[in-house]
Image (tube, coloured by chain):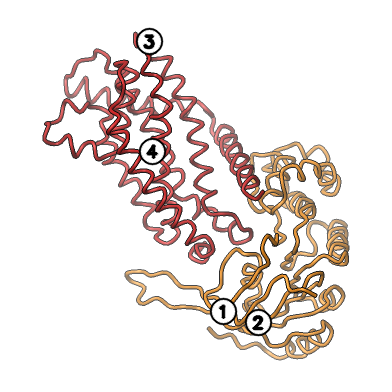
C-alpha cells in the first residue's frame, strides 16, 4: 500500500513564552523522534499514556502545525480532518446554519453541507430545535449537532481523538456505531483511544508512543496487548 | 477549490458576527450609528464650545472624519485579537490564519458601507450635492481598505506572539486619531509640518474624502499614490509573515 503520510524522525517542540520576570525560555519536546507511515486504506491506532504526545501527533498529521525537526511528507491535495465536535460554531446561528458553517470549517464544501442538512437533522434528533439558535441548546444537543455534522464530512484521512460516543446512552450507541461503520468502510483513518478493545477491533496496525517516541509499531493485537501489560505498572512523568 | 471554501467560511462567519452583534445588544444595529455620532458630538463640543470655532459646516466636516476613522479604528481593534481568540479552534482544524482577521475586516467594512450611505445622504441634505469628483470615491475607499489591511493584518499576526500588544493597540490608535485631522484641517497647522502630517495615510484619506464630499474637487493624486504604495508594501510584508507563521503560530497561543 502507498503511504499517504510519512514521518521520518519527526520532532516537535513547544516553547514557553519569554517574560521579563519569568527568566529564560524553556523548550518542551512533545514529540522527540517519530517515524512511521500512514498507508492508504488502513485504520491506524495510536496508543500512549496521557501526555505521550498523541494529540500533538494528530495535529501534525492534520497539517495544523509543522515539525521542528525531521521530515513530514503529506501527499499533495490530501484532505485530512480531525473529527471535532462543534468547533467554530456560533451561538446566535441556528442549528441548520451551524451545520453548514462547521462542515465547511471541517473541510466540506458549502454545497455538500447544504445537501446533507436533512441527514444531519435526522441523525441529531433535534427536531424543531434545528431551526433555533444554538444558545438555546443543552450541552447534549450541542454534541449531537456537532457529531451529526462531523459525520457528514468525508475527508481522505479521518483523524479521531477519543470521541467514539457523545450525548445520552442511546445516542452514544448510535454515534459509536456510526464511527465503527465509517472505520470499517475501508477509508484511511487514525484513531487515538485508551480503550484496547476499540483499538484491536477497529485498527489494522497500532503505533505505541511514550514521551514523544515510538515504543512499538505493528499488528494491532500484538502491540495493544504489550501496551496493556505495561499500563499495569505505574507511570513516571518527566519533562 | 479550498480558497472558495475559505471564502465561504469568511462570508458565513461575517454574517454570524453581524447577526450576533445585532442580537446580543439591546440596541442592535443602532450602535453602529451611535458610535461615530458620539465621537462627532465630543469633537463638536471641543471645536465649537471649547475652542470657539465657527459652527458653519462643522458637523458635516466632523462627520466625514469620524465615520471614515470609525472604519479604520473598528477593524484594527476588532481584528487585533482575531487569531489569538480563535486559538482553541485553530488547534483542531487547519485554516489559513489570514482568514480570522479577514472576517473582522469584512464585518466592519459592511458596517462602514451602511454608515457611508447615511453620510452621503447627510451631505446632500446639508447643501453638498454630488459632483463629478464622486468618481474618485471608489478609489479612495479601496485605498482606505488597503491601508486598513496593511495595519490590521500585521497586528493580528503579532498578538499571539506578543499578547501584551493587545493593550498597545488602543494606546496606538488614540494618538493616531488625534493627528489624522478628524477635527481640524491641514490649513490649521503650520506649513512646515504639512510634510509630516501627510506621512499618515489616514490623514491623506480623510482629507481626500473631504475634498470630494464637501468641496466637490478631485483629491491630490500624488498623496493617494503614496498611500497606495505604503499600503501595498506593508500588505506584501504581511502576506509573507502569514505564510511563515501559518503552521507555527498555533504553538504560541497559550489558552
Q: How far is mark 4 from mark 1, CA to CA?
A: 43 Å
Q: B200 or B231: nearer the eye? A: B231
Mark 3 chain: B
Q: Colour of chain B?
A: red
Residue at mark 4 to residue at mark 2: CA–CA distance: 49 Å
Q: Are marks 4 and 2 on the same chain?
A: no
**Residue receiving disc 1:** A70
Chain A, hue in figure: orange
> Residue A35, which numbered label?
2
Question: What label does residue A235 carry, if any?
Answer: none
Q: Residue at x 67, y 82 (%)?
A: A209
In the image, which disc is placed on residue B129?
A: 3
Q: Position of residue B34 (x, y in %)?
A: 43, 26
Q: Are marks 1 and 2 in contact (CB under 8 Å)?
A: yes
- Of all chains, the one bearing label 1 is A
Which callout, 4 or 3, points at the residue further toward the start of the chain? 4
Q: Is residue A187 above or below residue A212?
A: above
Q: Which residue is mark 4?
A: B73
Amino acid at each position: 500500500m502507498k503511504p499517504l503520510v510519512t514521518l521520518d524522525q519527526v520532532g516537535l517542540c513547544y516553547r514557553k513564552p519569554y517574560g521579563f520576570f519569568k527568566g529564560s525560555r524553556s523548550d518542551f519536546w512533545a514529540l522527540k523522534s517519530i517515524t512511521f507511515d500512514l498507508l492508504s486504506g488502513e485504520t491506524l491506532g495510536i496508543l500512549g499514556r496521557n501526555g505521550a504526545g498523541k494529540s500533538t501527533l494528530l495535529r501534525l498529521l492534520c497539517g495544523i502545525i509543522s515539525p521542528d525537526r525531521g521530515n513530514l511528507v503529506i501527499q499533495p491535495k490530501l484532505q485530512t480532518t480531525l473529527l471535532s465536535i462543534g468547533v467554530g460554531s456560533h451561538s446566535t446561528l441556528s442549528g441548520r446554519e451551524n451545520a453548514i458553517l462547521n462542515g465547511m470549517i471541517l473541510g466540506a464544501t458549502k454545497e455538500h453541507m447544504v445537501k446533507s442538512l436533512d441527514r444531519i437533522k435526522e441523525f441529531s434528533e433535534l427536531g424543531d430545535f434545528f431551526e433555533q439558535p444554538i444558545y438555546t441548546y443543552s450541552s447534549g444537543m450541542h454534541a449531537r449537532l456537532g457529531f451529526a455534522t462531523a459525520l457528514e464530512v468525508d475527508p481522505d484521512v479521518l483523524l479521531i481523538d477519543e470521541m467514539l460516543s457523545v450525548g445520552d446512552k442511546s445516542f452514544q450507541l448510535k454515534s459509536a456505531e456510526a464511527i465503527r461503520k465509517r472505520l470499517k468502510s475501508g477509508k484511511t483513518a487514525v484513531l487515538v483511544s485508551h480503550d484496547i478493545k476499540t483499538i484491536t477491533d477497529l485498527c489494522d496496525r497500532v503505533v505505541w508512543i511514550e514521551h514523544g517516541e515510538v515504543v512499538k509499531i505493528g499488528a494491532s493485537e500484538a502491540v495493544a496487548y504489550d501496551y496493556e501489560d505495561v499500563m499495569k505498572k505505574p507511570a513516571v512523568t518527566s519533562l | 477549490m479550498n480558497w472558495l471554501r475559505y471564502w465561504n467560511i469568511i462570508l458565513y462567519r461575517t454574517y454570524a458576527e453581524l447577526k450576533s452583534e445585532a442580537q446580543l445588544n439591546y440596541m442592535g444595529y443602532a450602535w453602529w450609528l451611535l458610535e461615530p455620532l458620539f465621537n462627532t458630538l465630543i469633537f463638536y463640543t471641543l471645536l465649537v464650545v471649547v475652542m470657539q470655532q465657527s459652527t458653519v459646516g462643522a458637523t458635516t466636516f466632523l462627520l466625514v472624519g469620524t465615520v471614515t476613522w470609525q472604519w479604520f479604528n473598528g477593524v484594527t481593534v476588532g481584528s487585533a485579537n482575531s487569531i489569538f481568540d480563535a486559538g482553541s479552534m485553530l488547534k483542531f482544524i487547519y485554516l489559513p490564519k489570514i482568514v480570522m482577521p479577514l472576517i473582522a475586516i469584512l464585518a466592519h467594512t459592511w458596517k462602514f458601507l451602511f454608515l457611508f450611505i447615511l453620510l452621503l445622504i447627510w451631505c446632500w441634505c446639508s447643501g453638498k450635492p454630488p459632483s463629478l469628483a464622486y468618481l474618485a470615491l471608489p478609489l479612495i475607499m479601496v485605498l482606505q481598505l488597503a491601508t486598513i489591511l496593511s495595519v490590521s493584518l500585521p497586528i493580528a499576526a503579532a498578538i499571539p506572539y506578543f499578547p501584551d500588544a493587545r493593550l498597545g493597540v488602543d494606546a496606538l490608535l488614540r494618538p493616531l486619531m488625534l493627528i489624522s485631522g478628524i477635527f481640524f484641517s491641514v490649513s490649521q497647522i503650520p506649513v512646515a509640518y504639512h510634510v509630516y502630517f501627510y506621512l499618515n495615510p489616514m490623514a491623506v484619506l480623510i482629507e481626500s474624502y473631504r475634498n470630494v464630499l464637501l468641496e466637490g474637487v478631485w483629491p491630490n493624486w500624488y498623496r493617494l499614490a503614496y498611500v497606495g504604495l505604503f499600503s501595498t508594501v506593508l500588505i506584501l510584508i504581511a502576506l509573507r509573515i502569514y505564510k511563515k507563521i501559518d503552521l507555527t503560530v498555533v504553538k504560541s497561543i497559550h489558552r
